[in-house]
Amino acid sequence: MGVILKKQRDGTIRPHWYGKYADGKKCRVINTGVTVRGTPPPNTDAAFTRSREEAEKALARHVEDARRKGRADHLTERLIESKTGRKVEYVRLSDLAARWRDLPRETAPGKDWLAWCDSIFNRFAAALPKVTYLHEVTPAQAGAYRNRLAADYSRRTAHGAAQMLKGAFARLLPIGAANPFAGAIARPGPDDDAGTVHRRPFTPEELQALFTAGRRDAFLFPLVVCAACTGMRRGDVCRLRWSSVDLAAGVLAVKTHKTGAAVEIPIFPPLREVLTIARRAASPYVWPLAARMLADNPDGLTYRFKKLVAETFPTSEATQKALQAAPPAPLAESLPAVEKAVCESLAGPRRDRVLATLRRYAAGESVRAIARPSIEGAPDHRGQVSMDLHDAERLSGISFLPHPSAAPSVKDEIADITRTARTAREKGQRFASILDWHALRVTWVTIALSAGVPIETARLVTGHESVNVVLRHYFKPGREALRTVLLAKMPAVLTGGAAPAPDPAAELAELAGKLAARTATKEDKARFRKLAAKV
């Protein structure tokens, strides 16, 4: 068995590879459908070798299919085809990722989601190297792979991968074949939620501090306000379109990107302020720069928000002192004095280079920009730029450079406040974030439900499909907040506190209702006149 080249009558090589194999006592030759590429013998090249390898794989598939048709299974396939009108198709495990991509869908999937699917399918295929087709995967093999996922990954990651494999097998298995991933029993255990790290909501006071600190960042501030006032996800905030904004009616009509749910959200005054400031441009997006950054560098958005959180709520005393310390005066204010000191202490090309560096730095150029010289004699790398600036600072005795303090680095400070205790989870490869963009969504739900907003109303705004999701993952009141709400709502017989004072406005309204219905007594009328006089 092997692949061969065949020639035309005029002696030229035919355009396709042919395969030769033995079928019982007969020798058969087929056209593999693979085009001959490159230079044929005797001077072969890499392209010719690759085309021959592709032809060998095509021949092997044809021989396997031919042998399968000779078995009794083929009769079953023909019976199924005659009953259903659909041809029985056997999908290779190695082709699972590609076949899943080619399935018809109502909407085009995102690149990141498809890459995630590819990684799941390719890891599964690598775990079963001796299995060729999907229908050959046994329930025991599927169960063993589930256990491996549960041992190596967090519960959410393992469950998501198993569900993805289950759905793919259901779509691509031959008709009548049992799904090996359908036999597992998913039952919540006694400590089912122990491995899940939930986001922590901001308190109203923390949210106000975040707004105050965020005003310094004109790019980030409107995004934070929009996320906090609407409970929308980061992607929906950055992709918000002017067509979804109705300032006259005071409503955002948004179709969520993740679930496709259509939601209507009232525009609160802080959100109206940032929407009014945003100017309509040629772009359909309210914040075009945010939409572009979401597409090009989504991790950069996360980093900028976490940095804002770390700067607003510093955890270490050293960081707090560093943030409170006055920054050095700009070089532009002291440039003549610094230049004079440099001229008195240095001479020749070095003096000229340091002076050129000082003038560019005083004009607002960064060290990185200065290291790409536009004038002759300027330094040619960042280390030299930094050395020249520090020499000028030392010679003049005037401080104009930011100096490192004993405070932790920005990345360490971000990790301390936005991640869970800086300790790795038992399962999972990443630290769990507790204060990121999605924490603003958790904040909105927690504040709304704590304020007495009906959960169905909150769900209409957030676009969640079920109340269970809202309660399990998004309603996370802190201990003090929970205690305050319970003390205010529960009766004094349970809380041990004094009975709440009657509300004069509510009592006045009740008495007015009795007067209108002509059921008020003399005591009610006297009480009504007394309360009305106070108001």
Image: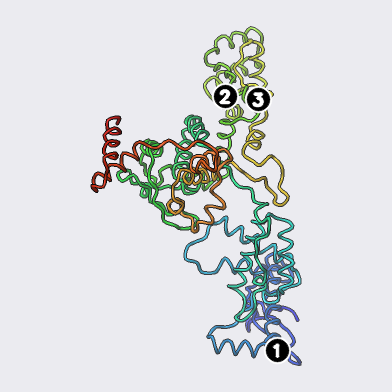
Q: Which residue is mark 3?
A: 317
Can you tell which of label 1 and label 2 is closer to the viewer?
A: 1
Q: Secondary structure at mark 3?
A: helix
Residue 223, above or below 373: below
Q: What residue is drawn where x is 51% and y is 45%?
A: 446
Residue 414 vertical placement versus 236 (above, below):
above
**How far is disc 1 from disc 2 in space, using C-alphas?**
81 Å
Q: Nearer the viewer, residue 509 or 136?
A: 509
Q: Give the amino acid type for the residue marked by disc 2 in the picture.
A: Ile
The quarter of the picture where the N terminus appears is bottom right
The residue pinned by badge 2 equals: 375
Q: Residue 344 appears at what percent x and percent y?
A: 63, 7
Cα distance, mark 3 to mark 1? 77 Å
Q: Nearer the viewer, residue 335 or 444?
A: 444
Closer to the chain start, of discs 3 and 1, is 1
Residue 59 shown left or right of residue 232 in the figure: right
- Give the mark toward the camera: 3 or 1: 3
Most distant residue in the front direction: 522
- Kindly indicate whether the residue at mark 2 contacts the one at mark 1 (C-beta within 8 angstroms): no
Label 2 secondary element: loop
Residue 178 placement: quadrant: bottom right
Bin the neighbour count of mark 3 within 10 Å (Cα to Cα): few under 14, some 14-19, many 20 and up: few
Instruction: Look at the numbered disc 1 and give the secondary structure of its residue.
Output: loop
x then y, percent, for residue 287: 43, 42
Q: Earlier in the sequence, mark 2 or mark 3?
A: 3
Residue at x 27% of width, y 36% of height? 526
Residue with the mark numbered 1: 71
Amino acid type for the residue under numbered disc 3: Glu
Decide if residue 2 is in sight here. yes
Kind of residue at badge 1: Arg
Mark 2 packing: few (<14 Cα in 10 Å), some, or many (20+)?
A: few
- The answer to which of 491 and 434 lies nearer the viewer is 491
